[in-house]
Image (cartoon, helix red, strand yellow):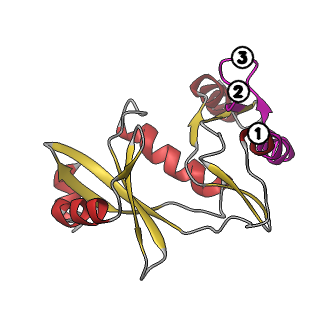
Amino acid sequence: MRAWAEVEGLMLEDGDFERRWMDGGQREGTEHQVYFDPPTQRWFKRNNLCNHGHWLEYFQRLQLHHVLFPEAPLRLEGFVAHDGEFQPIVSQPDVQADPGAAWDEPTARTATRAFLRAAGFEPVDNPTRKDDYYSPSLGVEINDMHNENVIQTKAGVAAFDPVPRLDWAHKFHRIKARLGL
């Protein structure tokens, strides 16, 4: 993958990302280090891939995010070599929250649940996973839809850091059905 990125000119300077991240307050979560770029009005994220078992799963997440959450699409910018690891850099537009919206945890959960139900998702039936949803018709599970990863906008709910995943058993079933197996 790294050889391909080098040939395609997708290798970015990690020092540039590191400087901007440090200057931006060193925002980070479990998987991302993030900074905001005022000239482009985009958020840039370096991902350590800790939520993914392999690259295909990560790229499927990007595609699922793009399809499910078009209000804050992710764009692959390139890759960096960071601390000996090959890591992707993505960006997404700055999405403004509705300044008049109260967005505490219960309000966010209620609005997110209504938004996802309208899209065919139901909460996962597990009290320890109150921010996870599943669509049996799509075979997609979305994790991490808590009030720090979604915002209320004037147009509705915008998700900017969910973890959508394909349900592999469902995917294989659809492939078999399509092929008549």
CA distance separating discs 1 and 2: 9 Å
Query: Residue 156: x, y in percent?
Result: 80, 60
User: Is mark 1 in CB contact (under 8 Å) with mark 2?
Assistant: yes
Label placed on residue 130: 2
Task: Please indicate whether residue 53 sits to the left or right of residue 122 in the image.
Answer: left
Q: Is residue 139 above or below residue 28?
A: above
The magenta stretch is: 109-133
Classify the position of the C terminus by image quarter: top right
Amino acid at dot 2? Lys
Secondary structure, mark 1, is helix
Query: Residue 46: x, y in percent?
Result: 34, 53
Most foreground residue, 95 or 85: 95
Task: Please indicate whether residue 30 sits to the left or right of residue 146 in the image.
Answer: left
Furthest residue toward bottom: 39
Of badges 1 and 3, nearer the viewer stands 1
Amino acid at dot 3? Asn
Badge 1 density bin: few <14, some 14–19, many ≥20, Cα 10 Å: some
